[in-house]
């Protein structure tokens, strides 16, 4: 377990999130009975046993995200976002010409949903977005424009965070064997992009530019950590852990709030909790699990009985505080829904499923009224 850096706070100076004295996962139950060996274990054998134990203990728990997705109510999951690429492999604001890799991430969630429901054609369509995006990769590993990606390092991190999830889920699915060759060709490209992002210059930019946005720090963590799994690069995993630590500096334990620009935001709270849940699938940590539970409890309290998301006091969305691509930032109902679905599927908490259903039912009513 890694420790969280302390976050100075006027409310609770020097407090550190999490509980102390928790029992470790290797705590024994019942009475231990020693086993007699006919002959002592040699030092060589003992050394190998220690190595095997350390590898098993430290290795990320890959191969579980698809199982989590399949536990979600499928009628709700279809309201969690995703974007079908056009004939050029582009989605979102890239449809009229490539602007930034972050806009391509919707295609990766489209792929994930397609994998979960076994849709062969949709998975193939999503591959167009992967191929189209990496056509902009240059010899440095970044995506065009004189060694910098369109949109800056954060844009590339967002793309890698979603791409890596799609690749890992693809591997563990029934599509894995037929996608093996494609994935193997993709791995060097992912590695080159992640290693470019890991250069001190760009890593420091991420730390500085995303410092007040824990949701983005968790995107960064996934970009490094999951790229480390995909490409078997231990250093990338270590950097990923570092960004989780940075994100948790902006976590307020007493109410479970991820502080976005110094305060609570009912939209970005869900994004941060969603990304941290994905991290925990691959890098389990009981202390962070407890933090997620508190964060979700806070978020659920903002979901009203009619499915409306309370925006009172939001620091970044819903009240015209920030603009994006010429529009005021609104509450992202799809990501809030997905965040709640992950929590329900991971923990069995029916309250999270119920909150997600309220949001979806309200969206359905709004769509019906618009027609």
Image (cartoon, grey):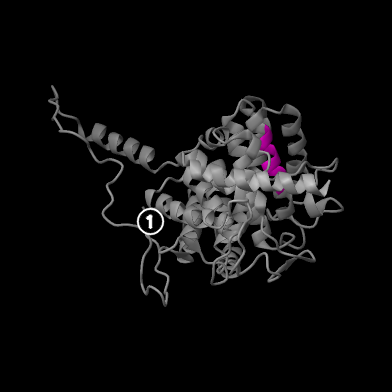
The total of numbered circles placed on residues is 1
Q: Position of residue 232 (x, y in %)?
A: 52, 42
Q: Nearer the viewer, residue 252 or 107?
A: 252
**Residue pictured at 40% horizontal, 64% vertical:** 254
Dominant secondary-structure state across the stretch colored magenta: helix
Disc 1 target residue? 2
Q: Position of residue 214 (x, y in %)?
A: 54, 62
Start and end of the magenta stretch? Answer: 106-114
Whether residue 177 is visible: yes
Picture quarter containing residue 4? bottom left
Name of the residue lying farthest toward the bottom: 10
Q: Position of residue 164 (x, y in %)?
A: 61, 44
Residue 311, magenta (yes or no): no
Residue 111, magenta (yes or no): yes
**Residue pictured at 65% horizontal, 32% vertical:** 115
Indicate the secondary structure of the residue bearing disc 1.
Answer: loop
Q: Is residue 277 above or below residue 34?
A: below
Q: Is residue 137 above or below residue 319?
A: above
**Residue pictured at 55% horizontal, 51% vertical:** 275
Name the quarter where the C terminus is drawn: top right
Left/right of residue 115 with respect to residue 91 in the rendered view: left
**Residue pictured at 37% horizontal, 60% vertical:** 3
Left/right of residue 35 with respect to residue 160 in the rendered view: left
Q: Nearer the viewer, residue 147 or 151?
A: 151
Q: Callout 1 environment at 10 Å: few (<14), some (14 to 19), or many (20+)? A: few
Q: Position of residue 265 (x, y in %)?
A: 58, 64
């Amino acid at each position: 377990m890694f420790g969280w850096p302390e976050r100075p706070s006027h409310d609770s100076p020097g407090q550190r999130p999490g509980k102390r004295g928790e029992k470790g996962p290797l705590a024994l139950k019942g009475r231990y009975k020693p086993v007699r060996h006919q002959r002592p274990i040699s030092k060589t054998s003992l050394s190998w046993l220690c190595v095997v134990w350390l590898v098993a203990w430290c290795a990320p728990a890959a191969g579980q995200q698809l199982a989590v997705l399949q536990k979600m109510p499928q009628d709700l999951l279809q309201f969690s976002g995703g974007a079908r690429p056009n004939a050029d492999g582009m989605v979102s604001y890239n449809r009229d010409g490539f602007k930034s890799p972050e806009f391509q991430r919707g295609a990766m969630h489209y792929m994930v949903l397609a994998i979960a429901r076994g849709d062969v054609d949709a998975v193939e369509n999503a591959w167009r977005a992967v191929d189209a995006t990496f056509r902009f990769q240059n010899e440095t590993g970044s995506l065009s424009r004189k060694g910098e990606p369109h949109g800056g390092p954060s844009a590339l991190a967002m793309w890698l965070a979603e791409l890596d999830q799609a690749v890992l889920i693809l591997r563990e699915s029934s599509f894995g064997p037929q996608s093996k060759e494609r994935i193997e060709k993709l791995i060097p490209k992912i590695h080159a992009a992640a290693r470019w992002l890991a250069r001190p210059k760009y890593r420091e930019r991420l730390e500085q530019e995303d410092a007040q946005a824990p949701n983005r720090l968790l995107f960064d963590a996934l970009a490094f950590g999951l790229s480390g799994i995909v490409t078997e690069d231990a250093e990338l995993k270590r950097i990923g852990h570092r960004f989780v630590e940075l994100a948790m500096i902006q976590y307020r334990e007493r109410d479970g709030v991820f502080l976005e620009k110094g305060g609570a935001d009912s939209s970005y709270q869900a994004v941060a909790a969603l990304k941290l849940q994905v991290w925990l699938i691959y890098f389990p940590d009981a202390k962070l699990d407890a933090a997620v539970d508190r964060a979700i409890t806070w978020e659920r309290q903002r979901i009203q009985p009619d499915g409306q998301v309370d925006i009172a006091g939001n620091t970044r969305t819903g009240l015209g505080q920030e603009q994006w691509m010429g529009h005021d930032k609104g509450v992202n109902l799809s990501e809030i829904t997905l965040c709640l679905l992950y929590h329900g599927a991971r923990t069995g908490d029916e309250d999270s499923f119920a909150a997600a259903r309220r949001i979806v039912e309200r969206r359905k009513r709004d769509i019906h009224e618009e027609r």
